[in-house]
Amino acid sequence: MSDSGVKVLDAVVVGTGMAGLYMIKRLNDRGLNIQAIEAGSGVGGAWYWNRYPGCRADLPIIEYSYSFSKELEQEWDWSEVMAGQPEIERYLNHTADRFDLRKHIKFDTKVTDAIYNEDSNTWTVKTDQGDTYTCKYCIMATGCLNEPNYPGFKNADSFKGDIYHTAQWPREGVDLTGKRVAIVGCGSSGVQTIPELAKQAKELIAFQRSPVFTFPARNAPMNPKFLAQAKVDYSDIRERQRNSEMGVANYSGPRRPKDSNKPKKPRPSKKILDLTPEQRKQEVKDFGINALSAYVDPYFNPEANEIACDLYRETLKDILDDPQKAEALSPKNYPLHCKRPVIDTEYYSAFNQDNVSIVDLRVNPVEEVTPTGLRTNDAEYEFDVLVYATGFDAMTGTLKKLNIRGRDNQLLADRWKDGPRMYMGLQTVGFPNFFTTTGPGSPSVVSNVLHSIEQHVEWIDTCIDYLLENNIKTIEPTIEAEDAWVIHVDKAAKGSMMTAPTCNSWYLGSNIAGKPQGFMPYIAGTKTYREECDEVVAKGYEGFALTS
Ligand code: N01
C-alpha cells in the first residue's frame, strides 16, 4: 500500500468466472501480488449470474471442466452428464476454496476505470467502492457473454408486474407457481428455461422473433461407472481435446448403457448430399432430429444446408401437435449452423402443453409494453411476470462500457468504435500489458470455451513470466501484426454458414442495434490457434513490441 492509500500490485484480474479463478491461481502460484475484483457476491461469472431455471452446460461436463488439476479432476463427482448451473456453481466455489483463491478476491465491487500511465508503465484501476490499485498487468477475465441485452421496447418501464432477465436471475429464485408469465427471446437461454417455466406457470406466452434450430441434449444422470472410467481416462481426454479443433474429445466411455438399443448418431464425417431422400428420412427416423446436426456438408454447402433445414422443418410437424405452433417454431430465412448451436431438454414438448403458447413476432412485432403486459400490432397480451431471455451485448459490451484508457489517454471504446481490433484475441494496440482472456479474434465462444480459457490463461501467465524474467517493461501488439490478424480472422470465417448473407447473430454483433457488424470469434479451430500462439512465443513474441 502506498502513502496515498493506493494498493500497489503486480496484477489486477477483473472477474472471477472460470477464467478469472484460474488466472488468479496461476499468478498466485508464481508469487505475484494480485487483486481480483468481482461484481457479484460470489465466484462463477456466467455460472453465477445465469441461474435461471433450466440453465445447464451444453457440453458433456467431463469435457467442460478444468483440466489444470489432476487432483480436482479426481475428487469432484459430477451428478449429471450435462451438469446444471447449481452444480457448476458449487464446483467453481469448491475450486476457489480448494486453491485458497478467495483471499485475493474483492466481491460486490465493480471496476469503473483502468488507465495506463505511460511514465511508470503501470495501470491504475479504480472501483465503484472507492478502491484504487496500481499494477503492472491488467487482465480482463470478464467473459464474452456478460453484458445483458434488453430489447428497449417502447414504454418498457411501464409494466407493473415483475421483470427478470435470464442473465440476472435472482439468487433466491422466483416462484412462478400459478402465475401468467411471458418470455421474450428463444435463443439458448430461452430454450433452456421455457420447459422449466412451463412446469410452474399457469400460463406461459413465448414471444419469439427468430425460431431456433435446437437439438436434444440427451442429458442423463451420471453413470458412476462412466465417471470412474472418465477419471481413469482424463489425461487421454485432455490430450484428445488438445488435438481437436473444438477443444472437444467426444469422449463416449461407457456412457451408453449396455442394454440400450438406441442407435448411435451418424458419424460426423457423413455428408447429407451422399444420401438419397429416403435414406435421409430414415436417419431422422432412426436417430431423431439430432441426425441433422451430425452431417458435415451443411456447415459450408448451401444446397446441403437447405436440405437439412427442410428436413428439420418437416420433422417439427411430427414433433408438435399443433400445426400452427409447428409453423411458428420453424426456423426460416437463415441457415442451420449460422448461430451458436442450441441444445435443449424437452423444448418442443413444452409447446405441446396447453398452458404454453407462442407469439410469432416476425408476423406481429411488438409495439409497446403496457402496465399489464405487451401489445403487438394485432393483439394485447396480459400477464403477471415478464422474462427477458434476450441475450447479451456479446464479446465487447463489458469492455466498451468501462473507462479503459491506454496510451495517449485513448478510450478502448473509441479504438473499437468500428468493431474490436485485437492481436490473437489477447491484446490490442495502444494498451500495453493489458490482456483479455477469450477476447475477440480468438476461438473462445466457437469452441469448448473452458478449453480456450485454460489455453489463454496459460499463455498470459507464461508471457508475464517471460516479461519479468527478462526485465521487459511492456508488451503490446504491433499495428502490422494486429491488422494482419484481423484479416486472418475474417478470412477464416469466409464461406462458413456463420457469415452467410442471411445470417444474423451475436457473433456478428447484429443482435444489438447500432453495434458495428463483423464476425468476432476466430473459427480456424483451437488446435490451429494454439499452434499459432505457440509459434508466436517460439519466435520471441513475434508480432508484439517489447520494451525494456
Ligand atoms: O441469447 P441469444 P441467449 N425483440 O442472443 C431475442 C450462451 N448460452 O442468452 O434471434 C424480440 O442467443 C433473439 O431474437 P433474434 C450461448 O453461447 C449458453 O439465449 O435476435 N426478441 C433471440 O431469440 C448462447 O449463444 C448456454 O431474432 C429479441 C433471443 O432474444 C449465448 O449464451 C445457455 C429482441 C436472444 O438469444 C446467448 O444466448 C444459455 C427483441 N428486441 C446461453 N432482442 C449453455 O447452454 C433479442 N431477442 C451453456
Image: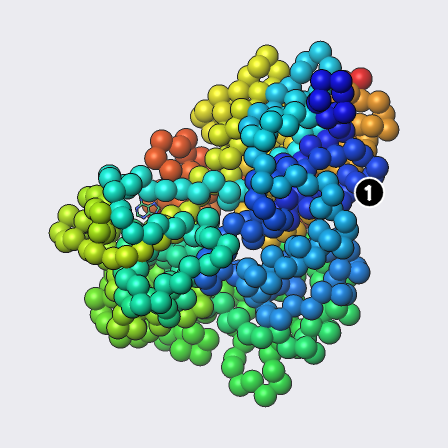
Name the residue located 50 percent from the left edge and 54 percent from the top edge: 171
User: Which x, y percent locates residue 63?
Assistant: 64, 61
Q: Amino acid at mark 1?
A: Asp
Q: Residues within 10 Å of mark 1 (few under 14, many from 20)?
A: few
User: Would residue 450 be visible to someone looking at this image?
Assistant: yes
Query: Which of the image's four quarters has the C terminus?
Result: top right
- In the displayed structure image, the side of residue 195 where residue 92 appears, left or right: right
Q: Which residue is mark 1?
A: 29
Total number of numbered discs in the rendering: 1
Name the residue located 60 percent from the left edge and 27 percent from the top edge: 130
Residue depicted at 46% across the width and 52% down the height: 169
Q: Please state if 290 lies on the left or on the right of 371 as rendered.
A: right
Tell me if residue 28 comes above or below residue 132 in the rendering. Answer: below
- The quadrant in which the N terminus is found is top right
Image spot of residue 467 (x, y percent): 80, 27
Q: Under 8 Å from ligand 1: the CB of mark 1?
A: no
